[in-house]
Amino acid sequence: AGLALAPVPASAAAPALAGTRSGILYFDKVARPPTVRADGDRVSIEWTVWRGGFDKDVIEKGSGSFAVGDNSANDAVDELVRTMADGTVRRATIPASFNFDADPARPTYLELRAEAPTPTRKR
């Protein structure tokens, strides 16, 4: 007899993807109400990068902060954080044209968490 497959519950369905004009596809694992970050707004991010898919080996993890639009972050990251509210966790497939990874023939898989930077205390 053949293998019987159980139906997939609606809660396990793949998330709906959104896209940007530049071709980045993304979905929010942890969504917050949309926000707009303008040039000069500071944002702290944590990131994880995979090659070959989100279920493959992690090739990089890190954190940092930058001012939106200051050209210190990859253009794909800058574009994604512009609509991420604090606490949002976004997974994105970055087209090879962004030169995010060393292999220009393959897309990069990225997860970002965005937060407002923690103010430094004056002493």
Image (tube, helix red, strand yellow):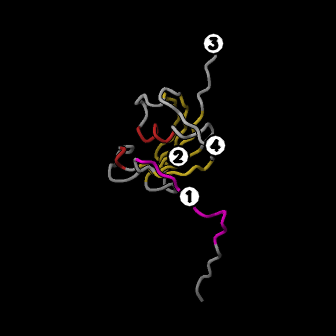
Crowding at mark 4 (Cα within 10 Å: few <14, some 14-19, many 20+): few
Residue drawn at x 54%, y 42% is: 112
Give the mark nearest the N terminus, 4 or 3. Answer: 4
Say what amino acid the circle numbered 1 marks: Ala
Query: Does the magenta run of residues contain 11?
Result: yes
Kindly identify which numbered label has been placed on residue 16. 1
Q: Which region shows up in magenta? A: 8-21
Q: How many marks?
A: 4
Which amino acid lies under the numbered mark 2 shown in the image of this protein? Answer: Glu
For marks 1 and 3, the one nearer the N-term is 1
Residue 107 higher or lower than 75, as above or below: below
Q: Residue 111 has which mark?
A: 2
| Residue 63: image location, x then y, percent | 53, 34
User: Mark number for residue 33?
Assistant: 4
Residue wearing tag 3: 122
Q: CA distance from mark 4 to mark 3?
A: 32 Å
